[in-house]
Image (cartoon, rainbow, N blue to C red):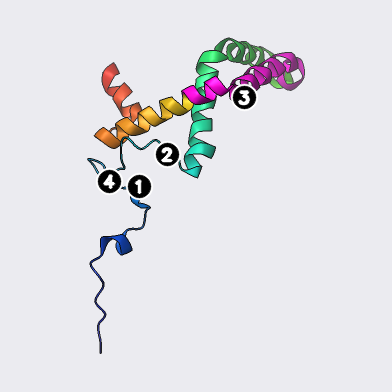
Amino acid sequence: MKTETRSSNIDEDFVLAKNLGGGPLGLGDPDDRSLRKAEREIMIPQKMKATAKSGRCSGVVREFGECAKEKGLMMPFLCRDKARDLEKCLTEAYTDPAFIKACTDQYLEERSEFRRTGVKAKEQKKDIVL
C-alpha cells in the first residue's frame, strides 16, 4: 500500500485567506483596515444600531419604551407616533455618511485592539468596572 505524503507547504494547508492570519497572536494583522463581507453587512450595522439607540436616538427610544410600558397590549395602536419618531431617527442615523464612517472606524479600532491583545472590547470594559 502506498502512502501519500503531504507537502509541508503552509499555503496549501492554510484554510483562511493570508490577510486574515498573522499578527502578534495569530488573530490577523492589527493594522489591516480591510473589511470582510460579514463585517460590512452584519457587524458594522449591529454597531450602528447599538450606537444610535444608546446615543443619537436615546431620548426617542426612552419615550417609545415608556409609551409601550404604559399602554401594554394596546401599544401597537397607541404608540404609533412614538414608533414613527423612532424609525425616523434611526433611519436618519443609518443613512448619515458621517455616522456610518464613525461606527466603521470604531469597529476597526476595536478589531485592531482585539488582534493586538486577544482581549475583546466587552471584556476590557468588564475589567475596568471591577
Task: Count every numbered label the image shows and give the total.
Answer: 4
**Residue 89, percent across and down?**
64, 17
The quadrant in which residue 92 appears is top right
Amino acid on which disc 1 is placed:
Asn
Which three-letter amino acid code belongs to the residue tagged 4? Gly
Above or below, 75 against 9 in this view is above
Relative placement, left or right, of 7 versus 41 is: left
Residue name at image x 35 percent, y 38 percent: 32
Residue identifier under label 2: 34
Which stretch appears magenta? 75-102
Name the residue that disc number 1 marks. 19
Q: CA distance from mark 4 to mark 3?
A: 34 Å
Answer few, some or many: residues within 10 Å of disc 4's Cα (few below 14, many 20 plus, some between 14 and 19). Answer: few
Amino acid at circle 2? Ser
Q: Position of residue 96 (x, y in %)?
A: 59, 21
34 versus 18 height, above or below: above
- Tell me the residue that label 3 is attached to: 95
**CB under 8 Å between discs 1 and 2:** yes
Label pair 2/3, CB-CB below 8 angstroms: no
Earlier residue among tags 4 and 2: 4
Q: Is residue 9 left or right of residue 101?
A: left
User: Given contact means CB atoms under 8 Å apart, are the residues at marks 1 and 4 in contact?
Assistant: yes
Q: What's the magenta bit mostly, secondary-structure-wise?
A: helix
